[in-house]
Image: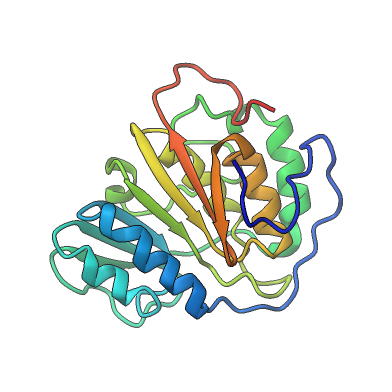
Amino acid sequence: MITNSSSPLVPRATLPPIHHHNNVSTLTEKEMKFLLKFFPSKVPCNLLVFGDEHEYSKITAMNVNGVTVFLQSNPSTRFTNNNTKVYKIAYNTVASEAYKLLKDARENEDCKRELTLPKGSKCNLGLSNLPREVYDTMWDVVIVDGPNGDTPDSPGRMSVIYTTSILARRGNKTHVLVHDVDRMIEKWYSREFLCEENLVYSKGRFWHFEIVGGVAKATKFCIA
């Protein structure tokens, strides 16, 4: 069920060009309140964050008895403590390629959700260069708030959202929080791979999805 959403999800059959406006991600007071209300019932947990460790430091502090992993393009630290790790990752795509990559993914059998991720995958959206820990862990919560993707030639979040959708379906249930859904790439890729039927609600520029795993040999991501 969608609440507080500014517009309904558009059917996947329609695929207009994807544009991106300059908007570097920062959390608003409303969004931080949402996170501080959301996490107490989830911690301790396995938390994966595509985003800046400083922006989510309050969440990290709440998950002191859990495991938190940050994946960033330009981290200021490499390792925080035994429960929180920060890894540097590189992206091979840019935001201006979003439309083409989404079209290609629909036509490429290697991008179907039944395939495991992502070592050896021939899907251009699969992130195959992440730390082994990311692939081996069953994540309870994943936050998508990086890379910035704020210009056409900067890394967009296409591969992040796709990869997250695969990782989330490996566990029993994974909460996925996508930030900046006022931007076209985040909207379209979330609709495509995280799916309207999994969208619980929106708050500010966050969409909250609950992804249930364990669906054997499913060959598509969404029901619709």
Q: Residue at x 86, y 50 (%)?
A: 16
Q: How many marks?
A: 0
Instruction: Decide if residue 88 is in sight here.
Output: no
Q: Look at the picture and state if 110 lies above or below 23.
A: above
Q: Look at the picture and state if 138 lies above or below 65.
A: above
Instruction: Decide if residue 195 is in sight here.
Output: yes
State which quarter of the image contains the C terminus: top right
Indicate how the structure is coloured in the image: rainbow
Q: Residue at x 57, y 72 (%)?
A: 148
Q: Position of residue 149 (x, y in %)?
A: 63, 69
State which quarter of the image contains the N terminus: top right
Q: Residue at x 49, y 16 (%)?
A: 217
Q: Position of residue 194 (x, y in %)?
A: 57, 41
Q: Residue at x 43, y 73 (%)?
A: 32
Residue that protrudes farthest toward the top in the picture: 217
Residue in the foreground of this view, choosing between 148 and 93: 148
Q: Look at the picture and state if 31 lies above or below 221.
A: below
Q: Position of residue 109 (x, y in %)?
A: 64, 26
Q: Look at the picture and state if 181 lies above or below 114.
A: below
